[in-house]
Image (cartoon, rainbow, N blue to C red):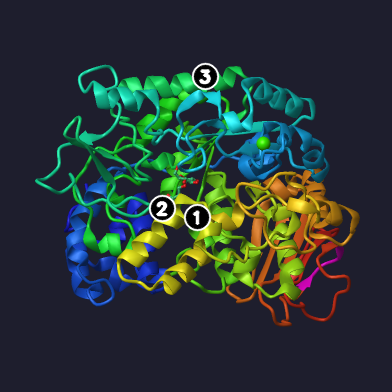
Amino acid sequence: MITRETKVGDLLKNPIARDVLAQMVQYAGVKESVLINPFTKGLKLSAIPKFAGKAVPNIDSVIDSMIDLFNQEDGTKPLQPSNTAYWWKEAIVYQIYPRSFKDGNNDGIGDLRGIIEKLDYLHELGVTALWLSPIFDSPNDDNGYDVRDYRAIMTEFGTMKDAQELISELHKRDMRIILDIVVNHTSDEHEWFIDSVKNPSGKHGDYYIWRRGKGVLPPNNWNSFFSGPAWEKVDERDEYYLHLFSKKQPDLNWENPAVRDDVCGIIDFWREKGVDGFRLDVINYISKTSLEDGSELLGKLLQFTGIEHYFYGNRLHEYLHELRTRAFKDAFTVGETPGTGLEMNKLLTADEREELNTVFSFDHLENLGKNRFDNYRYNLNHLKRCFGKLEGAYADVAWPSIFVENHDNPRMVSKIDPREEYRDFIAKLLAVVLLTARGTVFLYQGQELGAANVDFQDLSELRDIESLNKYESLTESGVSSEAAWKTVLCGTRDHARTPMQWTNGTYAGFSEHEPWIRVGDKDNYNAEGEMQEETSVWHAYQTLIALRKAHPALVYGKFEPVEANKDDVFCYFRDDGDERFYIEINLCARNISQPRVKCKMELIYSNYMAQGDGLQPYEANVYRIDAPVFETV
Ligand code: ISL
Ligand code: CA
């Protein structure tokens, strides 16, 4: 049991405390090693405010709520290492944002027939599984992440028959399908919600999180991720409902066993249709047993008030274990879990715990102290540190998910270095990092082409509710429209949501009709052109995917970093006892020298035509090692 009298040294035995302390020192801008120096280890929790007070004002107020969080996991047994082979560990998953991938019927909106048309393209690239962002019936307030009917296909995307054809065409090609299930919330147009509003004492009355307001104020001070308070008043019930995302995305009440039964029913329904796996939207947010006010201090640090009450809720593990045993069974699961730390993730995914197979951790997407809406150049040393942690000891007990792009983030090449002359090199460097990593690889549509951010001109070109709300709330709070636009432009999720560029023709070959969102900027990075050009980003992906598939060492092998503390280089071995590879990457735009590794090596991939003495800007090389013995000099 952790109390205010517990010493930091003992606190570190608790997995959640380890994660939270690590996050706190990072925010405070101090090195993590501060936690293990003898002085800090001897500090009692109650003494922390005295020492951390300057860096983290008001920390005292946070300590009590943290103690409750830590005690959830006090006394958990150490987890067993596991290296069992599963198809999903070897998978090269390709994420499709269906609205923007390919328009099969030329109405300007991507659809299932469009995806079916492109299966041979994906097969040729070498991907082995598709993850489709939600394809269910939805009013599209958040492009399908607001589901109206989990058992029907969105009309614009096609029919159930198309979905079944897609599943069987994938299976014919020995490819798997992963659906995106959004069950933290539904659409406010879902029949459960409509009934919940009308019949508070009926079957669905308690399907959502309803509370009385505090006078004229909402039930608590939590914020929505899409700006404004997380509560909306409904006069009919004279109550507020909780919505962590938009007003049209009410949060389900997982405390109600009938909600969990219904979720299991939905999963069964899709399992029976042959779906192989599920990506679970914000799945770590489902357990909300405390609706107390969020700490103002944490709210400022994390940008959203209230998160500490639900990002790792009391009954999260229980619910996930229930879903696994009742519904998922052997279907693959990847949880989207914003904000959880590595120790929590181990508890969510270790084989023996029977919860999820793997989770997306987001720590690597932004440099420390930065967020998606900050305008800055991403430093790749951070990626190296984060992936180094994931692929090392962490992966011995929990299997990582490896990705750098998805539908919620701007393009990584632009973030690292927007200079056109480096675009190819960086895109290929990322391909090397991903495809030689110890974890399941997730690629996002267009990444295989080296897609870059879009030069949006004004708000009228954006579609995303997050961007539109953010702009409005910034300008309402007094920020000039110019500054608000700059902020939104920098982080808008629409950068990744413009149509896939198939050709350099009209509408990039996506459709013959004007698309629902404008096409990205015209450049030479399109599928048709790149498939013909041997040195293209596309070919780099194809080559590296084939390499990974041919060599299990690149999937399961141990990850052994070389000179991990040296900045600007990322060098490591992958070794499964049968085969050994060496990867050598320059993380910056300067020529640099690399660690000298003394062993016989054969270069099997490089993003440069010719090697020099040191490493050229963003150079990335993969070597096979013949002699099993090596030493670094
Ligand atoms: O908004 C965030 C904080 O900036 C994110 O961490 C957020 O929690 C995360 O992006 C959740 O994303 C998922 O759920 C959303 C949906 O809009 C996204 O597209 C989806 O990936 C709501 O369903
Ligand atoms: Ca269409």
What is the distance, in whole Å, between disc 1 and disc 3 at their CAs?
29 Å
Q: Residue at x 56, y 58 (%)?
A: 461
- Quadrant for the C terminus, please: bottom right
Element assignment for label 3: helix
**SS assignment at label 1:** loop
Query: Which is more N-terminal, label 2 or label 3?
Result: 3
Please name the residue shown 39% across and 36% down the image. 184
Badge 1: how crowded within 10 Å, few (<14), some, or many (20+)?
Answer: some
Residue 307 position, x and y percent, is 31, 51
Q: Residue at x 33, y 50 (%)?
A: 224
Does the magenta run of residues contain 600?
yes
Q: Is mark 3 within 8 Å of ligand 1?
A: no
Residue receiving disc 3: 268
Residue 101's place in the image compared with 494, above or below, is above
Ligand 1 lies under 8 Å from the Cβ of mark 2: yes
Q: Nearer the viewer, residue 41 or 173?
A: 173
The residues bearing labels 3 and 2 have C-alpha atoms spaced at a distance of 29 Å
What residue does disc 1 label?
A: 362
Which secondary structure is most common in the magenta stretch?
A: strand
Binning the other alpha carbons within 10 Å of mark 2 as few (below 14), some (14 to 19) or many (20 upward) gives many
Q: Amino acid at mark 3?
A: Asp
Q: Residue at x 72, y 69 (%)?
A: 423
Q: Quadrant of residue 132?
A: top right
Q: Is there any visible trace of residue 581 in the rendered image? A: yes
Which mark identifies residue 339? 2
Q: Is mark 1 within 8 Å of ligand 1?
A: yes
Question: Which residues fall within the magenta stretch?
Answer: 597-604
Q: Determine contact: label 2, label 1, CB under 8 Å.
A: yes
Which amino acid type is marked by label 2? Answer: Gly
Q: Answer with the quarter of the image where residue 120 lies.
A: top right
Residue 409, position as x, y percentages in the image:
55, 56
Foreground residue among 98 and 121:
98
